[in-house]
Image (cartoon, grey):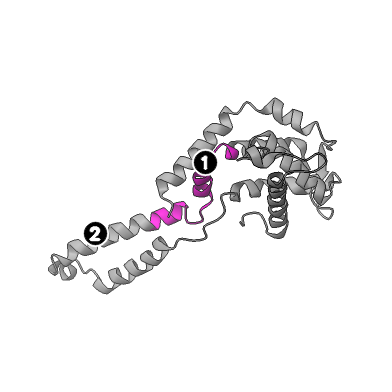
Amino acid sequence: MVTVDQFASAWVKFNELLHKSKNADRIDDFLNRYKLITKVKEDPYWDNYITKDEIRGYIKEMIALFQLTFNERSAMAFESSTPAHFKNKKSLNDLKKLQSALNNMEWAYDVYKIDKDQITKDIEKLKERATHRGIKRSHLFEIKNRLKSIYPYLKANGFTPTKKDEFIYDLFCEFEFEDYGKGGNDYIKVEGEISDFEAKQREKVKKIRLDCEKYPKGWL
């Protein structure tokens, strides 16, 4: 279960990393390796456009996410880590304290016209809401949400699925996400071939793309 402190701490650290970021030139250098149109239509049937500046922004946010730990990214993504969830939890504790106090002086129910049964019902309702753990999303959730805006931009620039995967793999390596582009002894290459380690990483990137194309923004 993610606590309110873990949830808040992860988001605070993310925002601090984002505002302290000095990667603008590196991001531009990376994007300049590709022939990208400044502004493209997100959907051929609607006048929704994605600009290169927006892509820069998404990449900047992703770099900050890369710098978080696995647990911090997981805390940011946890479904029940919401103000409503924590409010329900606090209300439940407050109501339990009230019930405990009233049970020690039964006369108070009649004097103050308090519905004892209603308090019990409210506690059960809040207990259900406050203990619901929601969906434990992947630590990649926030990264995938940004990729879901980047993939349509790449598609509008004529990128094939393979070329999209190449772009994201290079992005992960360039800005040091986890161990992409690294691998020690497992990363030894045979001339003309990629290592098993790199092959597995590229397969992960492909899966991320397939997930992003299958599920709408806000899922996973």
Q: Nearer the viewer, residue 34 or 202?
A: 202
Asked which quadrant contains residue 169, the reply is top right
Q: Nearer the viewer, residue 174 or 49?
A: 174
Q: Which mark is residue 44?
A: none
Specify the quadrant that holds the C terminus: bottom right
* Rendering coords of residue 103 (x, y %): 17, 67
Q: Nearer the viewer, residue 195 or 71?
A: 195
Q: Is residue 32 left or right of residue 21?
A: right
Give the residue displayed 14% in from the left and 69% down from the top: 106
User: Which label sits in the foreground, 1 or 2?
Assistant: 1
Three-letter amino acid code at disc 1? Answer: Thr
Give the mark nearer the N terminus: 1 vs 2: 1
* Rendering coords of residue 57 (x, y %): 67, 36
Read off the residue under disc 1. 69
Give the residue displayed 83% in from the left and 41% down from the top: 192
Q: How many marks?
A: 2
Three-letter amino acid code at disc 2? Answer: Lys
- Which portion, as a residue range, is magenta? 65-88
Read off the residue under disc 2. 97
Say whether residue 117 is visible: yes
Say whether residue 183 is visible: no
* Rendering coords of residue 108 (x, y %): 15, 66
Q: Nearer the viewer, residue 211 or 8?
A: 211
Q: Is residue 196 left or right of residue 111?
A: right
193 vs 134: above or below = above
